[in-house]
Image: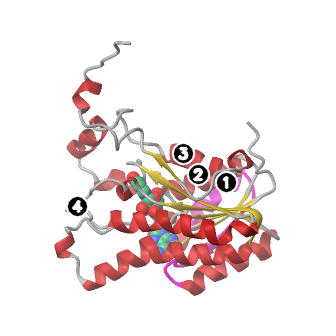
Amino acid sequence: MDLGLTGKTAVVTGASKGIGLATARCFLEEGARVAICARHEEALEQAAKELSSLGEVMTFCGDMTRQEDVDTLAEKALTRFGRVDCWINNVGASIRRAGRDYTPDEIRRTVDVCFTSAVYGCQAAGRVLGRGGVIVNISSLAARCGTAGRSTLYGPLKAAVSHLAVMFAAEYASRGIRAVSVLPGFTITPAVRAGIAPEELRRNEAGTLLQRMADPAEIARPIVFLCSDAASYITATSLEVSGGRSVILNPEFVTEGNDAG
Ligand SMILES: NC(=O)c1ccc[n+]([C@@H]2O[C@H](COP(=O)([O-])OP(=O)(O)OC[C@H]3O[C@@H](n4cnc5c(N)ncnc54)[C@H](OP(=O)(O)O)[C@@H]3O)[C@@H](O)[C@H]2O)c1
């Protein structure tokens, strides 16, 4: 299927690694040009070097929890490419913390990185996207499932990130701009791999219909699809990409290899 993204421009926030990097790669493979950002310059430039054989890449070193940085990213992408068609609010992070233990500073930082960055992104995107433009907010399966005790504030903030897409979809609809959210399940990024104990990994896999965690590219491809003309009637909604993680109550049934038709 031709996704019709050739010559278009995508801004991907938080794209020096993980899902953001995979998304930038996927856009380039579809013929789009990309602007990627992150806070640490060395990793960002390394990512750009990796991607550059696939197409045109602009880098911006900045912090998406700072409105002036988000606005500068938008201006620079528009100046460099002459148009911005897709905007992916991918920045987000969680800390392992029970709800009762968050300090005021941790609450503020979690809200900033998970939610405020997406608000600034939706605002900036609204200034640079033209008709046919698309915003994708990267939420999480945690928006739907309880992760209490593990990172208690992350899920509620990701639910807000999903609903933010609905609100901006309504606000920008008359200008021909769509907005959606994607809810990834456990995805094997370098940070997840480093932070998860083998037994927890196995438990997560066993509790997923597809019996494994996602590769970042498996999250990136649906994101890019949602930005394409093939998704032209999809707006104000969310897409869970979790391998069936949220629906399984009896994982043993799946692991027993039940193939009775
Ligand atoms: N991996 C999963 O299992 C999973 C599951 C569900 C949802 N998600 C969501 O998917 C998104 C990507 O997750 P990931 O696991 O791919 O993350 P990751 O591997 O930790 O990568 C995060 C990227 O964002 C950048 N970044 C972080 N804070 C930033 C900020 N304030 N300003 C600019 N850039 C920033 C990082 O670079 P710098 O550190 O250099 O800034 C890095 O490039 C997040 O929103 C996450 O909540 C992930």
Cα–Cα span, label 3 and label 1: 15 Å
Residue behind mark 1: 227
Q: Amino acid at mark 4?
A: Ala
- On the picture, is 17 further left or further right than 95? right
* Residue 133 within the segment the image draws in magenta: no
In this view, 152 is above or below 19? below
Disc 1 vs disc 2: Cβ atoms closer than 8 Å?
yes
Label 2: how many Cα within 10 Å (few below 14, some 14–19, many 20+): many
Q: Secondary structure at mark 4?
A: loop
Task: Return the disc, 3 or 4, that comes first in the chain's sequence.
Answer: 4
Residue 223: mark: 2
**Where is residue 5 drawn, in percent x and y?**
76, 51
Lower position in the chain sequence, tag 3 or tag 1: 3
Is 149 on the left-hand or right-hand side of 50?
A: left
Q: Which residue is mark 3?
A: 217
Quarter location, residue 245: top left
Does label 4 point to a residue whose CB lies under 8 Å from ligand 1? no
Q: Is residue 62 magenta?
A: yes
| Residue assigned mark 4 | 148
Whichever of callouts 4 and 1 sits on the residue coming sooner in the sequence is: 4
Instruction: Please say whether residue 51 is visible from this viewpoint.
Output: yes
Q: Which residues are magenta?
A: 44-66
Residue 40 in view: no
Q: Residue furthest left?
A: 100
